[in-house]
C-alpha cells in the first residue's frame, strides 16, 4: 500500500514539475515549488515507513518546517522589487 | 521497487537541471534550483543517507534560495546575452559526457556490497564504532572523532568563506548615506504588513529553533549534528528577518554576537583538540577528556558538534545579513 | 538489470555535464554559479550512490535495524560537510558577483571584458 | 485489532493517494492561476491529512506517531498560509481572478 501512495506522490511531483517548467506566470512556479515541498514531505514520511526506519521522520519534519521559508522569501522578493520599481519610477518622474 | 522510485526521481532531477540551464529568467532558474534541491534530498534519502538528506533539507530548501534571491535583487534577473560559441561549447560538453559515460562502465554495479569502496575503512568504522565511541549514529562518530581533522578543516573553510563574504560586502556601497535614509517609506510595502504570514511565521520560529536544538543534541542517536542544526537555526532567524525585518532580527542577535558565535565555535573545536594534547594525548584525541575513554570520546563529540553548530549558524546568518544590508543601500 | 545497475552513474555524468555546460557556455555570472551548484550536486550524488549497499540501511544503529547491512558511512560524512561548505563558497561567489555588478554595472561576462579592454 | 487497523489505514492511504494524484492533475490541467491554486491546496490539506493519518494508524501509539502528528500540524498551518500569501501577492501584481475567462494572461515575470 505504501508503494501505491509513494508512486502517486511521485507522479504528482512529476506533474508539478511540468507546471513549474511551463509557467506561465512566476506565481504558477512558486505554487508548484510549494506543492513540490509538501509532496516531498509526504514522500519522505512514506519511504521512512517503507524502509522500516520510522526514526527518520525527522527529515520530513525538517521539510515541513523549512519549506515555508522559500515561498515567503520569493514573495518578499516580489514585493520589494515592486517597491523598488515604484521608487525608480517616481524618481524618474521627479527628475 | 525503491530502486525504481530512485530512477524516476533521478530522471526528474535531470529534467529539472535541463530546465534550469535552459531558462533565460534567472529568477525562474533559482526557483527550479529549489525543486532540484528537494529532488536531490529525496534521492539521498532513498540511497540510505539520512544525515546527508537532512543537511540538504536544511540548506537547500531555505537558505540557498534566500541567498540566490538576495544576489538577484542586487544584480539583475534576466540573462541578457545569447550564449556565444554555443555549438563549440556543446561539442566540448558532449564529448566530455561521452568520456565520463565510458568511464561509468567500469563502475561496480549499483549497491554491490563487494564494491571497492566497501573494502576500505568503511566497514572498520561500522565495526569499531560501538567499541570505541558507543553511539548509534556512525556518521556522527566518523565525522566527530575518526575523521576529526577533516571536519576541523571544513569548519575553517566555512569560517573563511564567511569572513570573505563579510570583507566583500560590508564595505561602503554605491549609494550615499542620504539615500539610505530614504528607505523606510519603501520597506512598508514588504511582507511586514501582511498579517497572516507574519503571525504564522512568528508561531513557527520557536519550533524551528527547538527542532534545531533537537537536531544538534540528538545527532549522536539519530540523523543530525552540528552542520544540520546550524543551518536550521540560521533558517529560523532568516524566517524571522523575512517577516519582521532586518532590524528586529539584528536586535535579537546583533552582528557582534554573530561574529562572537562564529569565532567561539571554531575556537571551541580547536580548543577541544588542544585539550587532548594538554591532557597527555594527541590533537583531537578525546579519549583523555574523561576517565573512561569511551565517555571521553562522547564528551568530545558533543563539544565539537556544538562548535560546528555555532560556527555554521554564525557564518550563514552573517552572510545573509551582509546581502540584506547591501540591498538596503 | 545491468543497465539499471549503472543508471545512477549515468545521471551523475549527465548532471555533471549540464552543470559544466552552464559554467562554460553561459556568460551570465549568476547562471554560472547556478551551474556550479548543479555540478556540485552531481558530485554529491556520485559519492552517495557509491555508499549505498543493496538491502542495507542508513548507518545508524537502532532496534529496528538490528542485524541489517549498513551503507558505508564515510562518503556520507564527506558529503555532509561538503554541502555546508558548498553553500558558503557559493555565497562567496555571489558576493563577488554583487561587487562586480556594482563596479561594472553588468554581470554579463563579455560586457565586463569589453569594459576592461577600454 | 490488527485487521481493523490495516483496513482503516488502507482506506486512508488509498484516499490520500487518490487526492494527491487528483490535485497533481488539477495543477497541470486547470486553466489559470487561481484554479490551479485550488487544485494544489487539495493535495496540501486533504491529501496530506489522509496519507499521514493512514501512516499514523499503522504506527500506533509511538514516537513516530507523535512526529507524524507534528508534521501534519505544521503542514496544516504553513501550506494554507503560503497559499494565502501567494494569492494575495498575485492579486496585488494584477493577475485577475476570472474563472470564466479561462486562459492565462501573457507571461508576467
Image: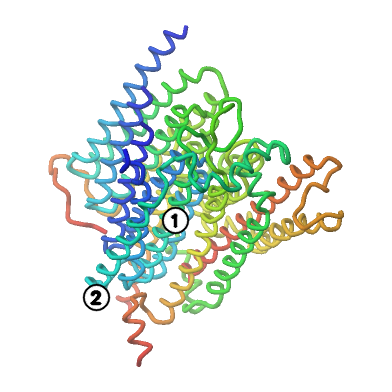
Quadrant of the image containing the C terminus of chain A:
bottom left
Q: Which mark is residue D101?
A: none
Helix, strand or loop at label 2? It is loop
Report the residue marked by disc 2. Answer: B85
Measuring 60% from the left and 69% from the top, which residue is drawn there?
Answer: B163
Horizontal side of residue B233 vs D97, given as left or right: right
Q: In which quarter of the image is residue B298?
A: top right
Tell me the CA gap for discs 2 and 1. 27 Å
Q: Are marks 2 and 1 in contact (CB under 8 Å)?
A: no
Q: Which residue is drawn at 47% across and 73% down?
A: C96
Can you identify the residue that label 1 sits on? C43
Quadrant of the image containing the N terminus of chain A: top left
Classify 10 Å Cα crowding around label 2: few (below 14), some (14-19), many (20 and above): few
**Quadrant of the image occupied by residue B270:** bottom right
Is label 1 in a helix, a strand or a loop? helix
Q: Position of residue D46 (x, y in %)?
A: 35, 27
Q: Residue at x 65, y 38 (%)?
A: B127
**Above or below C64: residue B167:** below
Q: Is residue A42 left or right of residue B156?
A: left
Question: Where in the figure is residue D60, as x and y percent of width and height?
Answer: 51, 17
Label 2 vs label 1, nearer the camera: 1
Q: From the viewer's perspective, is B229 left or right of D73? A: right
Residue B199 visible in the picture: no
Pointer 1 local density, CA inside 10 Å: few below 14, some 14–19, many at least 20: some
Residue B94 vs residue B193: left or right? left
Q: Could you confirm whether marks 2 and 1 are on the same chain?
A: no
Q: Is residue A93 above or below residue B102?
A: below
Residue at mark 2: chain: B
When the figure is inspected, residue B263 is found, relative to residue C100, above or below; the finding is: above
Nearer-the-camera pick, C6 or D85: C6
Amino acid at each position: 500500500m505504501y508503494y501505491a501512495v509513494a508512486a502517486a506522490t511521485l507522479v504528482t511531483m512529476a506533474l508539478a514539475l511540468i507546471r513549474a517548467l511551463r509557467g506561465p506566470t512566476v506565481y504558477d512556479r512558486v505554487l508548484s515549488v510549494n506543492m513540490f515541498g509538501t509532496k516531498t514531505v509526504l514522500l519522505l514520511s512514506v519511504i521512512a515507513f517503507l524502509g522500516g526506519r520510522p526514526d527518520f521522520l525527522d527529515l520530513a519534519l525538517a521539510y515541513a518546517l523549512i519549506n515555508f521559508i522559500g515561498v515567503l522569501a520569493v514573495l518578499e522578493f516580489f514585493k520589494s522589487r515592486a517597491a523598488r520599481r515604484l521608487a525608480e519610477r517616481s524618481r524618474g518622474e521627479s527628475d | 521497487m525503491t530502486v525504481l522510485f530512485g530512477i524516476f526521481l533521478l530522471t526528474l532531477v535531470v529534467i529539472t537541471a535541463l530546465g534550469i540551464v535552459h531558462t533565460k529568467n534567472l529568477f525562474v532558474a533559482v526557483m527550479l534550483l529549489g525543486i532540484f534541491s528537494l529532488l536531490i534530498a529525496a534521492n539521498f534519502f532513498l540511497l540510505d543517507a539520512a544525515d546527508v538528506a537532512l543537511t540538504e533539507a536544511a540548506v537547500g530548501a531555505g537558505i540557498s534560495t534566500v541567498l540566490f534571491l538576495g544576489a538577484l535583487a542586487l544584480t539583475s534577473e534576466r540573462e541578457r546575452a545569447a550564449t556565444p560559441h554555443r555549438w563549440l561549447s556543446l561539442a566540448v560538453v558532449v564529448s566530455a559526457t561521452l568520456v565520463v559515460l565510458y568511464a561509468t562502465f567500469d563502475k561496480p554495479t549499483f549497491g554491490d556490497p563487494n564494491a571497492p569502496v566497501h573494502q576500505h575503512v568503511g566497514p572498520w568504522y561500522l565495526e569499531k564504532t560501538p567499541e570505541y565511541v558507543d553511539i548509534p549514529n556512525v556518521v556522527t562518530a566518523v565525522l566527530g572523532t575518526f575523521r576529526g581533522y577533516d571536519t576541523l578543516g571544513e569548519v575553517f573553510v566555512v569560517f573563511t568563506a564567511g569572513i570573505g563574504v563579510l570583507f566583500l560586502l560590508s564595505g561602503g556601497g554605491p549609494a550615499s548615506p542620504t539615500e539610505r535614509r530614504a528607505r523606510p517609506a519603501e520597506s512598508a510595502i514588504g511582507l511586514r504588513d501582511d498579517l497572516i504570514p507574519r503571525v504564522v511565521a512568528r508561531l513557527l520560529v520557536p519550533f524551528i529553533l527547538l527542532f534545531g536544538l533537537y537536531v544538534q543534541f540528538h545527532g549522536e542517536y539519530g540523523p543530525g549534528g552540528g552542520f544540520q542544526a546550524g543551518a536550521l537555526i540560521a533558517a529560523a532567524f532568516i524566517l524571522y528577518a523575512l517577516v519582521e525585518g532586518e532590524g528586529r532580527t539584528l536586535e535579537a542577535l546583533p552582528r557582534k554576537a554573530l561574529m562572537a558565535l562564529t569565532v567561539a565555535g571554531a575556537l571551541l573545536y580547536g580548543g577541544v583538540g588542544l585539550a587532548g594534547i594538554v591532557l597527555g594525548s594527541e590533537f583531537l584525541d578525546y579519549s583523555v577528556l574523561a576517565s573512561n575513554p569511551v565517555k571521553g570520546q562522547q564528551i568530545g563529540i558533543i563539544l565539537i558538534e556544538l562548535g560546528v553548530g555555532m560556527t555554521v549558524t554564525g557564518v550563514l546568518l552573517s552572510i545573509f545579513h551582509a546581502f540584506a544590508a547591501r540591498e538596503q543601500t | 538489470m545491468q543497465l539499471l545497475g549503472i543508471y545512477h552513474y549515468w545521471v551523475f555524468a549527465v548532471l555533471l555535464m549540464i552543470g559544466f555546460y552552464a559554467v562554460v557556455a553561459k556568460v551570465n555570472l549568476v547562471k554560472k554559479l547556478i551551474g556550479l551548484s548543479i555540478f556540485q550536486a552531481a558530485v554529491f550524488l556520485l559519492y552517495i550512490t557509491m555508499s549505498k549497499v543493496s538491502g542495507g540501511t542508513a548507518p545508524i544503529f537502532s532496534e529496528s535495524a538490528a542485524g541489517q547491512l549498513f551503507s558505508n558511512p564515510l562518503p556520507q560524512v564527506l558529503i555532509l560537510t561538503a554541502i555546508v561548505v558548498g553553500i558558503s563558497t557559493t555565497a562567496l561567489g555571489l558576493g563577488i558577483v554583487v561587487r562586480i555588478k556594482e563596479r561594472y554595472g553588468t554581470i554579463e561576462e563579455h560586457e565586463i571584458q569589453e569594459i576592461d579592454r577600454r | 485489532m490488527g485487521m481493523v487497523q490495516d483496513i482503516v489505514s488502507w482506506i486512508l492511504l488509498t484516499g490520500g493517494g487518490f487526492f494527491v494524484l487528483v490535485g497533481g492533475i488539477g495543477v497541470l490541467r486547470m486553466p489559470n492561476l487561481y484554479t490551479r491554486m485550488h487544485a494544489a491546496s487539495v493535495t496540501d490539506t486533504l491529501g496530506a491529512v489522509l496519507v499521514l493519518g493512514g501512516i499514523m494508524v499503522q504506527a500506533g501509539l509511538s514516537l513516530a506517531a507523535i512526529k507524524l502528528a507534528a508534521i501534519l500540524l505544521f503542514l496544516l498551518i504553513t501550506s494554507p498560509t503560503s497559499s494565502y500569501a501567494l494569492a494575495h501577492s498575485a492579486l496585488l501584481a494584477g493577475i485577475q481572478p476570472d474563472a470564466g475567462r479561462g486562459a492565462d494572461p501573457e507571461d508576467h515575470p
